[in-house]
Amino acid sequence: DIQMTQSPSSLSASVGDRVTITCQASQDISNYLNWYQQKPGQAPKLLIYDATNLETGVPSRFRGSGSGTDFTFTITSLQPEDFATYYCQQYENLPRYTFGQGTRLEIK
Amino acid sequence: QVQLRESGPGLVKPSQTLSLTCTVSGGSISSGGYYWSWVRQHPGNGLEWIGCIYHRGSTSTYYKPSLESRVTISLDTSKNQFSLELSSVTAADTAVYYCARDGFRGDRRIFAMDVWGQGTTVTVSS
């Protein structure tokens, strides 16, 4: 099974900060990686698919990069509504999925 | 706009079978060739993909290997629903259960879940 290591597990930041989350796969997954945002009591929301593609309607401050085993998710300027938990998800073994452990982004 | 809604018992006894249904509205479950998934989230924890079902003429199912012996996902096109059954449950199966669907961007499938239900909480307890 492909393992996804997401880091950090939690992060404190301020409005306006640039924030980066990483996800590392245990083997090459090409660009088969998505990023989701989840707020308390809500279902996850797709933000980035295929490692770099911004989902329709998602603000451009959210960015994804990487391929192979190392991926990065960046919020270029944190907004108050961005405080949430973020998950990476790989789908190299289609159509089976594996999620990362999540990164909880909190207000400093 | 497709919407999903989970339903089922909120309390299940240990060793029994957990049964949930996801009702699809705003579109037909039998059109488009989508993958319909179940995902769960243990209290305070991350997301776990359970399995999915694909229907386009015939039906195929895919499960997380560690759950495969206990999971069955099925689809009822007449009711526009798909279902999850998880047998021999224990307290470790207590979670919020979500149904979800992947999407298309133009003619290209994206293997990402862009439509989700609101989730339903299932507690396993005697």
Image: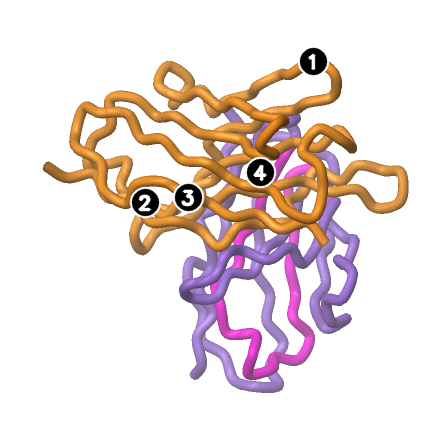
Chain colours: A purple, B orange
Image coordinates of residue B122 in percent, x first then y, are: 30, 44
Q: Which numbered disc, 4 or 2, marks the residue closer to the eye? A: 2
Query: How far apart are labels 1 and 3 at the CA level?
Result: 25 Å
Have a look at marks 1 and 4 and say if they share a chain: no
Q: Nearer the viewer, residue A95 or B28?
A: B28
Sequence-first tag of 3 and 2 = 3
Q: Quadrant of the C terminus of chain A?
A: bottom left
> Is the residue marked by circle 3 packed among few (<14), some (14-19), or many (20+) residues within 10 Å?
some
Q: Amino acid at mark 4?
A: Ala
Residue located at (50% from left, 34% from top): A3
Residue at the left extreme of this rendering:
B126
Q: Is residue A71 left or right of residue B23?
A: right
Quarter location, residue B65: top left
Have a look at marks 1 and 3 and say if they share a chain: yes
Query: How far apart are labels 1 and 4 at the CA level?
Result: 33 Å
Residue ID for mark 3: B7
Residue ID for mark 2: B95
Residue ID for mark 1: B58
Have a look at marks 2 and 1 and say if they share a chain: yes
Q: Is residue A77 left or right of residue B122?
A: right
Residue located at (44% from left, 39% from top): B48
